[in-house]
Image (cartoon, helix red, strand yellow):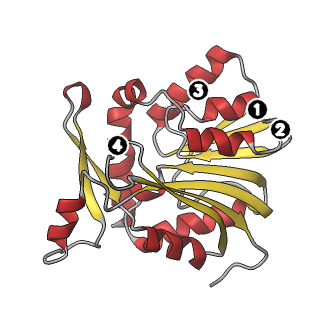
Amino acid sequence: MVNNHVKIAEKTWDAIAESFDVTRRKPWRQCIDFINGLSESHMVADIGCGNGRHLLLCAERFKMVIGIDISQNLLNIAKNKIKEKGFSNVVFIHANMVKIPLKDDSLDSILCIASLHNIKGRDERLRSLKEVYRILKNDGRALISVWSRWQDKYRTHYLKKLFYNKEEFGDIEIYWRQHNLDIPRFYHLYSKREFVKDLNQVGLEIEKIQSVKLHSNISADNYFAVVRKGKLLLR
C-alpha cells in the first residue's frame, strides 16, 4: 500500500511539473531568512526541492548543495535552472524522503519546505522526519514547513470530517487545476499541536515555530519550524 502511494505521488508530481513551475517562482521570506542565517561553508540539502526556487538561493550561498525530490520531471526543471546560472556545486538525487540515500551525520543544514505533508500515513511521515534527524550533523539545523489544517480554505471541510471520517484525520485530496489540468494530490494538513508532537517524537528540538498567513486572511495556512538535532533520538 505504501509503495503504491509512492508510485502515485511520483506520477502526480511528474504530471503537474511544468504547470507547477510556472506558479512557483518566488522564494518564501521564511526560507530566505533561514538560508541567510547559515554559514556559507555549510553543506545543505533541499528535501522536496521541486522546481528549485529555494535551491537556487542555496547554490548562490553554500559550498555544496543537494536537491532531492520524488519527481524526476521537477528535478529536470531544477537542473536546467542550475545549469543556466552556471552553478557547479549542486548534486541532484531522485528519491523519496522516507528513505534518503545519504550517510548519517552528513549535512550541516536542511530545508524541507511543503513536502512532509504530501506523505501518506503518520508512520511514514515520522520515518521521513527520522531521516532528517539521521542525516543532520549533531547540532545541525533544519527548516521544515507544512500546510495548516485550519486555514481559511479548508476549515469547513475539516469541521465536517469531525463527525464522519474514514481516513486519517487531516488527510485530503487537493486538485491541481492550473493550465486546464485536473489532477488530485494527496495532502495531510497539520494542526500546530500535531506538527510539534511529530517533531518532538523523533528527537528534533524546536528552536522556533511560526504560524504564517501566506494566502489566508484569517487563519494561518502554513507552519514553519526551525529545528535542531539533539544528541539523543527519542524512540
Along the line of sight, which residue is nearer the eye, 143 or 67? 143
Report whether 24 appears left or right of 102.
Answer: left
Of pointers 2 and 3, the one earlier in the residue sequence: 2
State which quarter of the image contains the C terminus.
Answer: bottom right
Label 2 sits on what residue type? Glu
Label 1 sits on what residue type? Arg
Along the line of sight, which residue is nearer the eye, 96 or 60? 60
**Is 124 placed above or below 117 here?**
below
Label 4 sits on what residue type? Lys
Q: Residue at x 66, y 63 (%)?
A: 227
According to the picture, the residue beneath numbered tag 2 turns out to be 40
According to the picture, the residue beneath numbered tag 3 turns out to be 79
According to the picture, the residue beneath numbered tag 4 turns out to be 11
Of pointers 2 and 4, the one earlier in the residue sequence: 4
At mark 3, the secondary structure is helix
Of pointers 3 and 4, the one earlier in the residue sequence: 4
According to the picture, the residue beneath numbered tag 1 turns out to be 61
CA distance separating discs 3 and 1: 17 Å
Give the image location of residue 167, x and y in percent. 23, 72
At mark 1, the secondary structure is helix
Label 3 sits on what residue type? Lys
State which quarter of the image contains the N terminus.
Answer: bottom left
Query: How many residues crowd around disc 1 within 10 Å: few (fewer than 14), some, or many (20 or more)?
Result: some
